[in-house]
Amino acid sequence: MRLNFKKITPVIEWGSLLLSTGLVCFFLVVILYEIFSKGWSSLSWSFISELPTDGMTKGGVLSPIIGTVILTLITALFSIPFGVCCAIYLNEYAKNTWLTRTIRASIRNLSGVPSIIYGLFGLALFVQGLHLGTSLLSAGLTLGLLSLPYIITTTEEALLRIPASMREAALAVGATKFESIKDVVLPASLPGILTGVVLTLSRAAGETAPILFTGVAFYITDVSVNTSQEFMALPYHLYMLSTQHQSIEEVRPLAYGTALVLIMVVFLMNLTAFYIRYKYRKNDQ
Amino acid sequence: MKYKNRILIDRVAQHTFKLTGYLVLALLGGIFGMLLYNAISFFLEVKPLDFLTGREWNPTAATPTYGILPLIVSTTIVAFGAMVIAIPLGIGTAAYISEYASPKVKNILKPLIEMLAAIPSVVIGFLGIVLVGPKIAELTDLPNGLNALNGSLLLAIMALPTIITISEDAIHAIPKTYREGSYALGANKWETLIKITIPAAAPGIIAAVMLGLGRAIGETMTVLMATGNAALFPQDFFDSVKTITATIAIEMGEVPYQTTHYFALFAIAIVLFFMTLIANLVGEYFINRFRKYHAA
């Protein structure tokens, strides 16, 4: 009996770890299966290329898609230059002083600030303070602020990987520090920076809480892209279809379809990032 | 280009880079200042003690009450439940990936976990409504499954990638000599894992849990969609709860600008800010401790 027990304990022990891993994978599979199996039937070319019609009980998701794309572009235009410059400052210029350490600590804390608080800040700063109103621009800038800490961290990691000898070589042939960064360091770290940027933007594209009070709208009839107007966005469209719509059961297939489109947009962006990383690593060796 | 101009550009660039660094500092200060400024306007009208100890949150009643206690308890219940689920699963998975899985399996598992992390919170919340909610209702004979348990399960899924990734890094960083020493004394793989590797990686694992907890406390859309949002004092996991984040999300869209209710939402936001800040600071403290002992 005793011998038997000794034989099965390792199996139980190993099994418990395997079980937890299996459960985690199970969660992922269930999520994907639910969305894909039920969203697939709603998905068609017309779903992607048509505007929502009849009080959003019919039609497609073109306006939320356009809204999300423009929103992400504004986020990128704001957060990439800002974030990359800050990372360059931290990695190339800043000395290890208390001020630098404080900046680094605040970046880490910014990445832990809940997204809804960024929404409040965007409301106070952009919508009310700078009088941009509830608009595409306000929402994009708010998401830009939310993305900043991630862009800074990933860019700094990419810059760190560039050996000091490359910088020194540039300086030795007479380049100024700025020229060495612009012509040598940045081109060499570009794939790493891009990977981080695309991953961060994919996260921003799926965010809902920060745009709730800064410009996202329930329903907009036309698709004129105007940065000073309210807009529709995929994540909010899904939220609205599944909780706020007057006939929730009727629009459920549309909600599944929207969830599927949103998940595919996010996964495609992630795949792009992985592809860049993969290619970069290959070239590196 | 003339030498003078090149030097000029160099100077300008240097100061631009520096400015962006300082602006990031100003951003955190700005967020905190904005919350504080609006929260002070609230505390001029409502006593801080009434706010912190009030057992009822009902700002739209004839005599509005602004007690944050039910919101804090709701947030705590949901986040606690999420951790009860996510901690064992997360550490178990991290240990499996780091200690047992072959490189091939590792290469499959890691992208899967990144995929889980990439799913937007609103999609997870949607599943709470269409999948988890009805299942809970079916199993417990409740009219609907939108309650704290639903929120906890979903938040656990959202916190898992953070916990797994950071714990796995921590366990992986433990030097091989620790394990070899343990094997040399006759311990088997499991004993080594439980008694040597995990205790040695404990600061890193605690950091992982705290960062996951911070994420669970601050998550908005998932709890907004899945927990029912009843403004009652929650008793157990089967009660519908209304967390701090959900309260802000629901009520900010409806309140008139610069009323007491408007300021009250900033007051609860500053409480939320501190809750997540503490979780993150504790996490960071343990990460630093871990780095000190296991610097590469």
Image (cartoon, coloured by chain):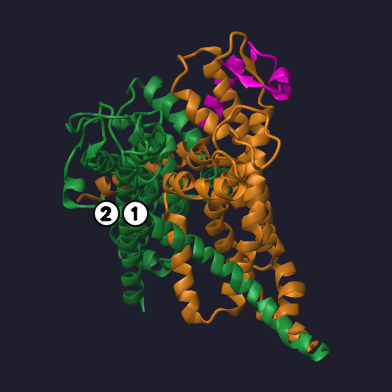
Chain colours: A green, B orange
Nearer to the camera, A102 or B194: B194
Q: Residues within 10 Å of mark 1 (few under 14, many from 20)?
A: some
Whether pointer 1 and pointer 2 mark residues with C-beta atoms closer than 8 Å, the reply is yes
Q: Position of residue B82 (x, y in %)?
A: 62, 50
Residue A284: mark: none
**Callout 2: residue from which chain?**
A
In percent of the image, x 67 and y 33: which residue is there?
B234
- Give the main secondary structure, helix, strand or loop, of the magenta stretch: helix
Q: Is residue A208 magenta?
A: no
Span colored in magenta: B31-59
State the residue position of label 2: A41
State the residue position of label 1: A38
The amino acid beneath tag 1 is Lys
Quarter of the rendering containing residue B253: top left
View extreme (right): residue? A2
Nearer to the camera, A172 or A10: A10
Q: Position of residue A127 (x, y in %)?
A: 37, 23
Q: Is residue B28 left or right of residue A70?
A: right
What is the CA distance from the residue labelled 1 to the residue labelled 2? 6 Å
View extreme (top): residue? B62
